[in-house]
Every structure is written in structure tokens, then in C-alpha cells.
Image (cartoon, rainbow, N blue to C red):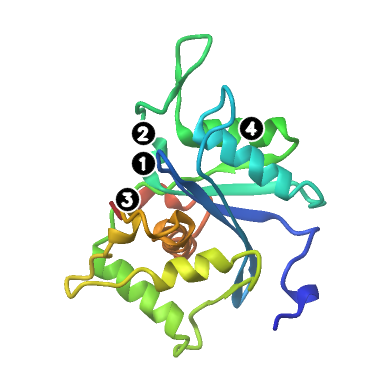
Amino acid sequence: NIDEDNFYDEYKGLEASVDFNAHFTSCTIWQDWGEEWHCIMNVFVKEPDTDMTMSETLAREVARRLVDHERKVIVITGDRNGSNISAGSKKLADGDLETFFDQFGTVMDEEGWDTTLDPLNYNPQKDDVHLTMQGVLSEREPEQPRLRFHPIHAKSTLVSMQFTPITTDYRKVKTSESKTTVQQENATHLGDTVDYYVIWKKNGGVGQSGSFDIDFL
């Protein structure tokens, strides 16, 4: 059980960690409570809305889920590939191409949010990511932050993390992302967003991430 009054604060800013995939685009929404980082919900979409990309569709769903949040301030981090110009990029009227992160930010702005984009951009070693996450999740070191997940609104993220075994060379086993028997909300995607978020936070968070990147693909 969690104490709802000390888990989510509608007057506190939010942080989102996004994973972009063609058929399953997802994010976890967080609040920093100092010694604890609270995952208040996960949000995902499996197909785009009419005339929208997957990134735009996810952002619209995030805005819908958070419509009653009072302090509409959010920082968007996550999957570095969302910063690439790719097949999913959107061409603007002036000819420029809008990345997945740009698309997400534009929709959030349109929905009345004060949005900051701070995607990851440096590749730590796989074993470094594994050891970092192991150190955080084990909760054996008092100086490490503690992750807390809402048992209902972030349940898919907890399942996703359990679906992600690690090989002896510290690589994630991603077979769940291609298995038709595994619901994609239970595959490794949402677990990746947790890794992105922790690495981003431990490297200083917004404004401090210019020298690092992350690659789970």
C-alpha cells in the first residue's frame, strides 16, 4: 500500500521518460521527492490517431491523463533515437523536419504545458547501466535514490521490468518485444524508460545531460 498524499502532488512539476517504437510508444511519468523518485503512471499507445504520429498520439494521451494536474510543467527525457531525423519525422510547413521529441513537445505545448525537452545523448556501457540499476533497485546503499511505483497506474512498468532478464554480458534480453504472446505493455519497453530516467537523473537531470547518451537497442 502507498500513501497517496505523499506519493503524488498535483502542484509539483513532472518528468517524463519516453521510449519511441513504431508499434508501441510509451513513457513513464515521474515526480522527484528527494530521496524517492515516484513513478506515478505509465502511458502507452499502440497505434496513431488519425493524422498524427505515434509520438503526437502519446503526448495527447499523456495530456488527457494529466488534465487535472494543476502545475502543468514537465521535462521530457528518454530514448535518444527520438532526437534523430528518421522515417517518423514530420515535415513542417517551412520544410524543416520535426523529431519525435519535437512532436511530443509541440503537442504538450498546445495542451497548455510548459515543456522542456532534454533527451539523452551519450552511450554508457551496458554493464555500467546494469550496475547502476542494480545499485538503485537493490536499495542496499543509503545514498542511492529509491524508486517507487504506483501499484495500479504504473503496474505495467513493474511487469515490464520483471520481463527483462540480463545476460552475462549485461545485455538486456529483448525477445519479449518480438513475441506475439507477450503484450507489449509487459515487454521491455517500459522498463527501458525507467533505465533512461535513472541514468538521466543521476547525470544531473535537465540542463546537465549534454555530455551523455544512452543506447539500449
Of the numbered discs 4 and 1, the one sitting upstream in the chain is 1
Please provide percent x and percent y for residue 166: 27, 72
Task: Name the amino acid type tagged 1.
Answer: Asn
Question: Are circles 1 and 2 on residues that touch, CB within 8 Å?
Answer: yes
Of the numbered discs 3 and 4, the one sitting upstream in the chain is 4
Q: Secondary structure at mark 4?
A: helix
Task: Name the amino acid type tagged 2.
Answer: Asn
- Which residue, given by chain and number where applicable, does mark 3 sit on? 122
Q: Tag on residue 81?
A: 1
Task: Measure the alpha-carbon separation of dots 3 and 2.
Answer: 13 Å
- Which residue, given by chain and number where applicable, does mark 2 sit on? 84
Task: Name the amino acid type tagged 3.
Answer: Tyr
Left-right relation of 185 to 177: right
Please provide percent x and percent y for residue 21: 40, 43
Left-right relation of 65 to 167: right
Residues packed near mark 3 inside 10 Å, few (<14), some (14 to 19) or many (20 plus): some
Q: Residue at 77%, 74% (x, y): give it.
A: 4
Task: Measure the alpha-carbon separation of dots 1 and 2.
Answer: 5 Å
Residues packed near mark 1 inside 10 Å, few (<14), some (14 to 19) or many (20 plus): many
Task: Measure the alpha-carbon separation of dots 4 and 1.
Answer: 19 Å
Residues packed near mark 4 inside 10 Å, few (<14), some (14 to 19) or many (20 plus): many
* Above or below, 97 relative to 217: above
**Residue toward you, 179 or 101:** 179
Residues packed near mark 2 inside 10 Å, few (<14), some (14 to 19) or many (20 plus): some
Q: Which quadrant would the N terminus be assigned to in this image? A: bottom right
Task: Name the amino acid type tagged 4.
Answer: Val
